[in-house]
Image (cartoon, coloured by chain):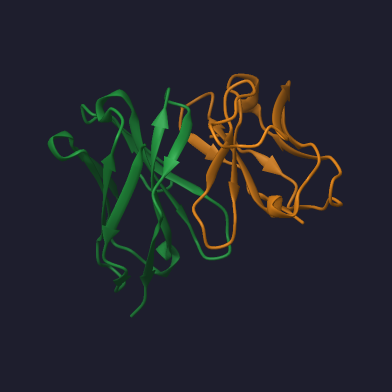
Chain colours: A orange, B green
């Protein structure tokens, strides 16, 4: 099965814009789904499909995709956005689910 | 409002079988797939497998020989069994709803399962 690769850590200044990326062959066929996980909590869905946000997710979160790379962008990062972020999609060959290794956003 | 609640034994000895159950409140149980995911302490998320209301399953290749996921539609519940556990199976185990076969939209709170002699 294929893998999804994320940078282990990314930092951003308060109010600035940050992009978190996810690379993998499966992203040529499936959109990435993005999750936010804060310490001691279950993951929360923040972006799904082409660029959709569940109810309650601020509009500073957005998603995009090009080729084998998906990106999660936070425009105007807030202190409460400090968390681990995971991407996820279907494997394009055997249809299993795969997760990226996660990116710690500071 | 969709909510998932889960329960099961939190402490196991090596070679025992892990058993967890997740109950779903709200939404249509039959319209979705249902998944199990785990997270070892300090590490990332790992997909275990999924099931739909009719019992069709798909499992992670790395766990396939030890995993069984089952469903009870009369109770809106689905369950995970993982046999012959070792310390490497120590993790927080999450149940989750899978929408459109792609998006893990709602997660349970997680259950810490520790394997220790």
Q: In the shown orientation, is residue A11 left or right of residue A104?
A: right
Depth check, front residue: A104 or B14: A104
Extreme residue in the left direction: B74
Depth check, front residue: A41 or A64: A41
What x and y, as percent, mark residue B42? 58, 64
Depth check, front residue: A22 or B16: A22
Q: In the shown orientation, is residue B42 left or right of residue A60?
A: left
What x and y, as percent, mark residue B72? 16, 38
What x and y, as percent, mark residue B5? 31, 51
Q: In the shown orientation, is residue B87 left or right of residue A74?
A: left
Asked whether the viewer can see residue A42, the reply is: yes
What x and y, as percent, mark residue A40? 53, 63
Extreme residue in the bottom direction: B117
The correct choice, above or below, for A48 with respect to B111 in the image is: above
Which residue does the image show at 28% across and 27% down from the upper left?
B28
Asked whether the viewer can see residue A68, the reply is: no
Q: In the shown orientation, is residue A103 left or right of residue B26?
A: right
The correct choice, above or below, for A41 with respect to B24 in the image is: below
Which residue does the image show at 17% across and 34% down from the upper left?
B73
Give the image quarter of residue A76. top right
Which residue does the image show at 51% across and 57% down from the upper left?
A41
The correct choice, above or below, for A12 with respect to B34 in the image is: below
Give the image quarter of residue A88. top right
Q: Quadrant of the C terminus of chain A?
A: bottom right
């Amino acid at each position: 099965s294929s893998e999804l690769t994320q940078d282990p850590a990314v930092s951003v200044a308060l109010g600035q814009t940050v992009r978190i990326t996810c690379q993998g062959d499966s992203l040529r066929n499936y959109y990435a789904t993005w999750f936010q996980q804060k310490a001691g909590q279950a993951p929360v869905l923040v972006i799904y499909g082409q660029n959709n946000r569940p109810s309650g997710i601020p509009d500073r979160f957005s998603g995009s995709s090009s080729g084998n790379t998906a990106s999660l962008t936070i425009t105007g990062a807030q202190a409460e956005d400090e968390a681990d972020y995971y991407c996820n999609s279907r494997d394009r060959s055997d249809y299993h689910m795969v997760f990226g290794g996660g990116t710690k956003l500071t | 409002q969709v909510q998932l609640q889960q329960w099961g034994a939190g402490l196991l000895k090596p070679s025992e079988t892990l058993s967890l159950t997740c109950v779903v409140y709200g939404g249509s149980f039959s319209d979705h797939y249902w998944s199990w995911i785990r997270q070892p302490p300090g590490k990332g998320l790992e997909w275990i497998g999924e099931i739909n209301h009719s019992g069709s399953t798909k499992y992670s290749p790395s766990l396939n020989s030890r995993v069984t996921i089952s469903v009870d539609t009369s109770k809106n519940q689905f369950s995970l069994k993982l046999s012959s556990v070792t310390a490497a199976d120590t993790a927080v185990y999450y149940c989750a709803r899978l929408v459109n076969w792609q998006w893990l939209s709602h997660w349970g709170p997680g259950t810490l399962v520790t394997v220790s002699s």
